[in-house]
Image (cartoon, rainbow, N blue to C red):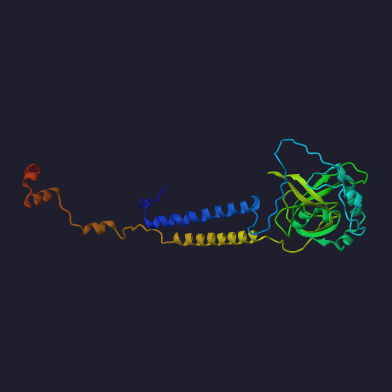
Amino acid sequence: MKTKSGPPRNYLGRGEQRRLFWTWMPLALVVLLVAGWLERTYVRRDDPPGMEQVDTVVPFGGEKVPDAVVIGPEQPEAVEETAFELGAPARSLATVRDDTVFRDGDREAWFSLWQTLRSTDPVVLRKSPATSVSFAELFGQPKAFRGRLVRFKGLVKRLQYVEAPANDSNIDGYWQAWVRPDLGPPTPIVVYFLEVPPGFPTGERIEERIEVVGYFFKRWAYQATDAIRTAPLVVSRMPYSIEGVTKSSPMDWIGSIAMATMFAVVVLSAVAAWLANRGPPRRVEQPSGDLSKQLEAVETESTEQALRRLSREGFPAAADASSTEARSRLDERSDG
């Protein structure tokens, strides 16, 4: 088995360092590109700069005491009753409280809204004169919108089925959706749907652009990963899918441009690496022709001739022993 042999590589040389750079740099850029994609897909990003911010953490006055329970008087809140606008009786809506989880006092209004939605055709509901709202409006004015029909567009990030508590309305469950609205900060609005269209995506990680037409219920409290937060809660008959390109935030555009630039750098680096390693291969010069004929032209001399030449050139002391021995061998040959 033949092995290639050649001079060792000089890793301190400029050419070798350039070769190593263009060999490994494309791979490093590919790793960086994949890491950026993973970060954009699975890591939670900060809110875009300059966008309106809303603090959704439930405020607690005074000293924070673990497992504290605050009991307040149950005084109904006044709700302007308009039969055409309200999806539930004003009397039941007056007992609903914001910044809380579901309570017994919310039960009557909650299922009254579901009965109204179930008796309304989805096509008719979508064409109803609902008020277009933003996150800030629902979050900041829950009493003004309670029980009224609202409309907004956004991106569904999660959709899961939730069983309903025992009730007399024959409602077994509904679909809980977390929707990032188009207008306002990237903070979710929680929407409960009575049904979803066939083939509509469900799960914890989805992205489906929809329009929501439903009744605002309350500013609902929920346990987030960092604190107890609140979000507007809307109930609707079903989500209305919007065809077309998903609306993206400015940060999504910046990330897309950065990923495209990085991809272009990877391609250019790969081309540069190919050109750098494309140089002419090393060639080992092989002797041409017959070696014996080439050696015939080389003058050679015997050992005795070499010693005599050295003695003539001024090296008698170094060559005495060798000269004596050479003469004795010559005398023996002549006698023979």
x then y, percent, for residue 94: 88, 49
x then y, percent, for residue 313: 8, 52
Pick whichever, 170 or 228, lies toward us: 228
Left or right, residue 207 beside residue 300: right
Vertical arrangement, residue 162 with respect to residue 79, above or below: above
x then y, percent, for residue 282: 38, 58
Left or right, residue 1 beside residue 30: left
Pick whichever, 136 or 71, lies toward us: 71
Left or right, residue 299 beside residue 260: left
Which residue corresponds to the image point at 86% horizontal and 42% vertical from the top-left?
104
x then y, percent, for residue 304: 11, 48
Which residue corresponds to the image point at 89% horizontal and 59% vertical from the top-left?
85
Q: How many marks?
A: 0
Pick whichever, 298 or 226, lies toward us: 226
State whether residue 73 appears in this view. yes
Left or right, residue 334 beside residue 18: left
Q: Quadrant of the C terminus?
A: top left
Pick whichever, 164 or 91, lies toward us: 91
